Amino acid sequence: MLVRDAMSTVVLTIGPAHTLRQAAALMSARRVGAAVVLDPDAGGLGILTERDILNSVGLGQSPDTERAHAHTTTDVVFAAPSWTLEEAARAMTHGGFRHLIVLDHQEPVGVVSVRDIIRCWAPARPRVPAAAH
């Protein structure tokens, strides 16, 4: 199976000046765990994840004043839609992260997460009614 088969095509793109609260609200509304940060001044694309926001709040920083650019990962590993899920999982394991931005012709076309890969490798089983146990 390929990345294109597993990735989410809902790509939330934010700017570097978004506050962490704004980013979190947008991520929550779209039900995604990462946002692509488009920052032409810093060289292009980065990623802001739910973990980045959690780490900031855990340090006592204010989500109302902290800006996305201060918490964005800019040395991003990108995936291609034609990668296998094994290649994506290997890149995630090697880099210690849970999301990959998927680029096609240098444009973000999706995000693939560990959860997306697991969903493909271990499809949900039909629910068994509680009385059947």
Image (spheres, rainbow, N blue to C red):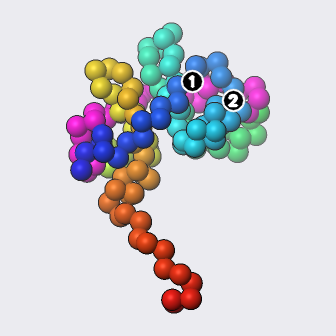
Q: Position of residue 10 (x, y in %)?
A: 47, 35
The three-letter amino acid code for the residue at tag 1 is Ile
Residue 76 % position (x, y): 40, 30
User: 80 or 48: which is nearer to us?
Assistant: 80
Mark 1: give few (<14), some (14-19) or many (20+) Cα within 10 Å. many
Task: Give the number of callouts.
Answer: 2
Residue to which mark 1 is pinned: 14
Residue 54: tell me if it is visible.
yes
Q: On the rendered structure, is 85 left or right of 18?
A: left
Q: Which residue is mark 2?
A: 22
Nearer to us in this view, 49 or 83: 83
Classify residue 107 by image quadrant. Answer: top left
Q: Is residue 104 above or below residue 124?
A: above
Say which residue appears at 38% left-offset and 29% top-offset.
109
Q: Does the segment drawn in magenta span residue 78?
A: yes
With 61 as the anchor, is 127 left or right in this view?
left
Any mark on residue 5, and which? none
Mark 2–mark 1 CB contact (< 8 Å): yes
Q: Is residue 107 magenta?
A: no
Q: Secondary structure at mark 1?
A: strand
- The span shown in magenta is 63-86
Taking the spot 32% from the left edge, 20% from the top edge, the residue there is: 106
